Image (cartoon, coloured by chain):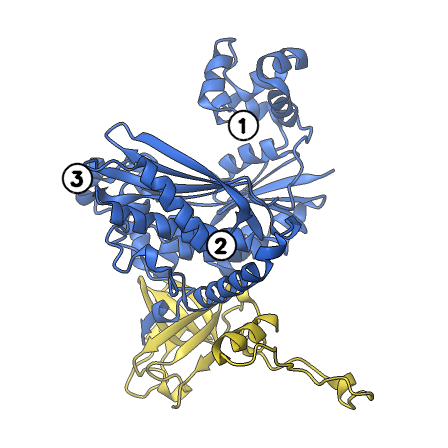
Amino acid sequence: MQDKVDLQVLTKNKLELPLFQSTIQAGFPSPAEDYIEKNLDLNELIVKNPSSTFFVRVEGHSMCDASINCGDILVIDRSIKATNGKIIVALLNGEFTVKRFVKTSEGCYLEPANKSFSIIKIPENSDFQVWGVVTYVLHRTC
Amino acid sequence: MSYIALVDCNNFYVSCERLFNPKLCNRPVVVLSNNDGCIVARSNEAKKLGIPMGAPLFMYRELIENENVAICSSNYTLYGDISGRIHKTLSTFSDKIESYSIDEAFLESSDLTCFQGIRKTILQNIGIPVSVGVANTKTLAKIATDYAKMESSGFYLLTDLNLLKKVKIEDVWGIGSRTSRTLAGFGIRTAWDFSMKQDLWIKKILGVVGLRIAHELKGFSCLSLEEVRGKKKSIVRSRSFGYPIGEITEIYEALSSYVSKASEELRQENSLATYLQVFLVMGIHDYLTSAHIHLNPPTNYTPKLITTAKDALKTLYKPGVKYKKVGVFLGGLVDASAIQLDLFSKESSIKQTQALKVMDKLNERYGGGTLRFLAEGIEQSWQHKRDKRSPNYTTNWNEILTIKI
């Protein structure tokens, strides 16, 4: 709060009196006083565990049917267990990829969300690792 | 019964680089110091090739090329961020925690089981492999961690003190090479030998510090976890130049930028400096000259510190000499809130503080160096090389990992 006031003083260049941001006491309390909550914070919504949360940008179209488009930013939480159906960032043969993780009785697969791409079966004893689970997708519209 | 665990990251800098660049996982890797001069971290494969810690890069260039060793410039921004995540995660295992270094922490608990999930959690949540050594004392925990690094589980509980018969005295925490040579003169070669000596003898030869180490080796805890780091007593800032510099204007630029950074740190600590020293290094044998100035009143105001540092530099600088390094030392730090300001200077110092506060906030938000003092220079050609620095994957939106999908 204090720093916000200082910035205004420096840029305004006129009055050096600080602007009051909150309501001034005028004799009777505001009816909203008991109900005031803090502002909405995006971090609170999408970053549940800051220590295990990472951000990556994607390029390509293999996941567009899952609403992950070229240029989007993904929020990844490594602390979440990768279970059947979750979209994950994976390492296959030393390369990063983003696909839906599918686990059936027949084995594990990396499934794209685009009919032009084919499903990848994860071979037994292959160099495969789950890097993290995708929790949110940030898509810019304008 | 209280247990102390030492959690130590395996090849920390290398591990941080490998986390975002998996292609480094199949090759030996070395990480270079500022200026890309020396090797400050090695992967296990690089260690096996015989590359020693601190080795100058040029001495091992050929080996590095022949063995396909990957070279990374140090990326302390990245390492610092990953380290913060690790320390935060560790604090969920025990509220008694001491962050000992960028990649080590001591934890204390009476419940042994609380340490067992640490390695798995850090590897899963952050992707960094760690080793956990547990014992009754810090000194023993340090030894336990060395053994943990050799276990596939990455965990080692030291309960049998007979193990100390196999631990060389120079590998004991707190015993340096000089002390171990002294002790070798008395026939002491292992940690066991040392712990068996009489208290009076140890106190006579090594003082109270040595006595504490011996007691710790016997399982009696003398060193408690330091939970709060006291305020810094001094701040030093210096770097070697990319190439030797003779022009005073370039040296001024470098010095001003170091002073600027150091003053930022001063303000973060809410401290003022009472003493400023500038030093210059030259020649093959790193000959050092210095000049100091007392600051009255004590200050953390960057412009004043820059001017003072420049004055000090003027007394040291000799034309015709090429210098390898310049640095600034701010000492005699005092708490800013404890100092009473001069009545007449009160107004200007409040304005100074506010201006600096805004500058610090903008630099924090948009990246260090966004707002700089002109004295720091615009091109800064003296900056050290960091050709092979990895992107700041976790602190800069323009440098986050891009995955082709």
Which amino acid type is marked by label 3?
Glu
Q: Is residue A132 visible?
A: yes
Residue that label 1 marks: B174
For mark 2, give the secondary structure.
loop
Q: Are marks 2 and 3 on the same chain?
A: yes
Between residues B336 and A91, which one lies in front from this camera angle? B336
Q: Going 18% across and 44% down the picture, which residue do you hit?
A: B65
Q: Are marks 2 and 3 in contact (CB under 8 Å)?
A: no
Which amino acid type is marked by label 1?
Gly
Quarter of the rendering occupied by the C terminus of chain A: bottom left
Q: Is residue B54 visible?
A: no
In x, y percent, where is residue A105? 46, 73
Residues under labels 3 and 1: Cα distance?
36 Å
Q: Going 21% across and 47% down the picture, which residue do you hit?
A: B68
Chain B as rendered: colour: blue
In x, y percent, where is residue B247? 22, 45
Q: Quadrant of residue B33?
A: top left
How crowded pointer 2 is (Cα within 10 Å; few <14, some 14-19, many 20+) is rated as many
Between residues A114 and B337, which one lies in front from this camera angle? B337
For mark 1, give the secondary structure.
loop
Chain A as rendered: colour: yellow
How crowded pointer 3 is (Cα within 10 Å; few <14, some 14-19, many 20+) is rated as few
Q: Is residue A62 left or right of residue A38?
A: left
Residue that label 2 marks: B301
Considering only vertical position in the picture, is B392 above or below A113? above
Residue that label 3 marks: B62
